[in-house]
């Protein structure tokens, strides 16, 4: 049974990543010519830089993809570290949109989105329509992958050992943070990690108190992709990757003492569905991290310069 669950979950994750890559390819194909100029102009203002990060990540559904792109742009001299830090902060907020869509059972329109995407892609009326079709196909596959994950996790209800592990996470929150960081570091996608948590909640296997520490850890684990991508860059590229890690690490450290307060607030906000509680907690956590650390943007940049000399 465990082998069947693993195979199903891996199939869902594979479809999820395929969809994410198709969405990114579609958006980048449409925007590559102008993206550097737009980013360089808009990110001169930190608030506009944050907005850019939110929008790019909302469209590509990958904060890791956005931050890797930012590292490469810093390495190429297109963005400075202050601009990069603002976009990275926005990317953390933009990545919460996937979980929100899942929580509102967005799956019902996915067949229609897939049909429209295939139609636009194969009609090839214009380059823009073709790439829009690619984006829509990717969008549909991303949510199809989440649905496959949800269905594959159903048999976990019968595994007492798995349930005991989740109970221990609720009692030992630092263990949950470590688990979230490790698993997300391995799969290199916090969006996939959140989707798995929501899949468990759909099956009644996890509550918010158990999910929230894992969610916080996932925000740290997702930095692995950016750090790995920075190995081949210059000092400023590496500093941009360090800023991403510092931002997520400090956010977790600052908010960890208030984890029960955050959980209580979110439960009152959305008392009925755990899947929506997880989405709202994800959004609230990333929004609070942004608001708390935005005034210290310069400090994060200076700290990254001290770490990478």
Image (cartoon, grey):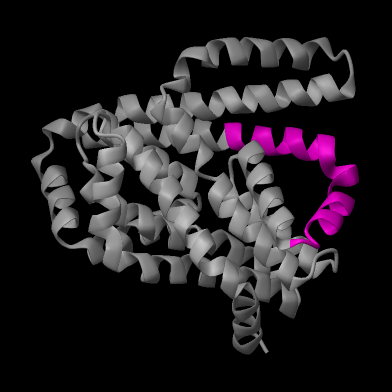
Per the picture, the main secondary structure of the magenta-coloured stretch is: helix
Q: Which region of the structure is painted magenta? A: 19-45
Give x and y (percent) for residue 2.
Answer: 23, 36
Whether residue 6 appears in this view of the structure is: no
Q: Which of 250/240 is in front?
A: 250
> Residue at the location (54% across, 11% down)?
111
Give x and y (percent) for residue 200.
Answer: 27, 36
> Residue at the location (82% across, 19% down)?
129
The answer to whether residue 196 is magenta is no
> Residue at the location (60% across, 80% down)?
299
Identify the image quadrant of residue 304.
bottom right
- Count the marks: 0
The answer to whether residue 23 is magenta is yes
Q: Is residue 103 above or below residue 163?
A: above
Give x and y (percent) for residue 16.
Answer: 51, 34
Q: Is residue 195 above or below residue 124?
A: below
Image-based side of 50 in relation to 292, left or right? right
Whether residue 184 appears in this view of the structure is: yes
State the quadrant of the C terminus.
bottom right
Q: Which of 225/253 is in front?
A: 253
State the quadrant of the N terminus.
top left
């Amino acid at each position: 049974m465990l082998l069947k669950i693993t195979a199903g979950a891996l199939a869902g994750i594979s479809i999820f990543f395929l969809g994410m890559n198709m969405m990114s390819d579609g958006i980048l194909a449409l925007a590559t010519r102008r993206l550097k100029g737009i980013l360089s102009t808009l990110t001169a203002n930190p608030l506009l830089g944050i907005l850019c990060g939110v929008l790019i990540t909302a469209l590509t559904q990958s904060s890791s993809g956005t931050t890797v792109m930012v590292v490469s742009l810093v390495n190429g001299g297109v963005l400075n570290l202050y601009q990069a830090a603002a976009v990275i902060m926005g990317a953390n907020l933009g990545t919460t949109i996937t979980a929100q869509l899942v929580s509102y059972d967005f799956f019902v329109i996915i067949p229609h989105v897939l049909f429209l995407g295939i139609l636009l892609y194969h009609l090839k009326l214009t380059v823009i329509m073709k790439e829009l079709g690619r984006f829509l196909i990717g969008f549909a596959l991303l949510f199809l992958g989440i649905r496959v994950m949800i269905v594959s996790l159903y048999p976990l209800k019968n595994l007492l050992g798995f349930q005991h592990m989740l109970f221990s996470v609720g009692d030992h929150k630092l263990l949950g943070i470590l688990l979230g960081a490790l698993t997300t570091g391995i799969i290199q996608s916090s969006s996939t990690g959140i989707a798995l948590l929501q899949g468990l909640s759909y099956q009644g296997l996890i509550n918010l108190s158990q999910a929230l520490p894992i969610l916080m850890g996932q925000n740290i684990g997702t930095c692995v992709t950016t750090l790995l991508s920075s190995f081949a860059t210059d000092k400023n590229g590496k500093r941009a990757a360090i800023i991403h890690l510092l931002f997520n690490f400090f956010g977790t450290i600052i908010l960890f003492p208030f984890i029960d307060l955050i959980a209580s607030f979110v439960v009152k906000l959305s008392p009925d569905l755990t899947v929506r509680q997880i989405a709202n907690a994800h959004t609230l956590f990333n929004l609070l991290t942004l608001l708390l650390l935005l005034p210290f943007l310069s400090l994060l940049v200076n700290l990254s310069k001290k770490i990478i000399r």
